[in-house]
Amino acid sequence: MTRGVIEWAPFRLADGVTEDQLLAAARQLQDVFLAHQPGFVRRELLRGTGGGWVDLVEWSDRATAEAAVRAAAESPTCLTYFRLMAGGDQVDPGSGVSHYDRVAEYER
């Protein structure tokens, strides 16, 4: 039985964008958009080495995750956030997003 869906959205910052700008826009995205989406569970913003970032979002199910990607394409708040990313002015904001069904969990 599937227990939630994980959204994996890796990105790099566009030239000239600062981490402070990203964090401010990420907070706006959270407060104005994600917090109001059906099926939204939680989100983490991850910074890797070498300039890589990942938005890791947990959804209750695949249908709500996919609906949120479609809604993001129409959201001015989301589009502002996406424009901070390299290639973020592309037509399809969901093109770099993958969804994974949680099939098992392991804890210490």
Image (tube, rainbow, N blue to C red):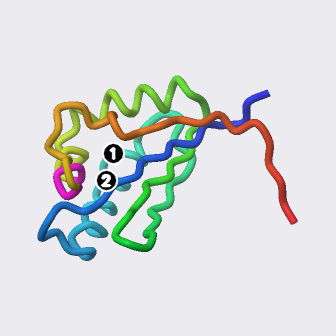
Amino acid type at mark 1: Phe
Is residue 51 depicted above or below 83 in this figure?
below
Percent of width and height locating residue 32: 30, 50
- Residue that carries the numbered disc 1 in the rendered image: 33
Circles 1, 2 touching at the beta carbon (< 8 Å): yes
- Residue that carries the numbered disc 2 in the rendered image: 29
**In the rendered structure, which segment of residues is drawn in magenta?**
81-85
Near-viewer residue (50 or 68): 50
| In the image, farthest residue toward the top | 63
User: Badge 1: how crowded within 10 Å, few (<14), some, or many (20+)?
Assistant: some
Residue lying at 33% horizontally and 63% vertically, measured from the top left? 27
Q: Quadrant of the N terminus?
A: top right
Percent of width and height locating residue 15: 14, 65
Is residue 6 found left or right of 97 in the rendered image?
right
Label of residue 73 in the image:
none
Percent of width and height locating residue 104: 80, 42
- Label tally: 2
Disc 2 secondary structure class: helix
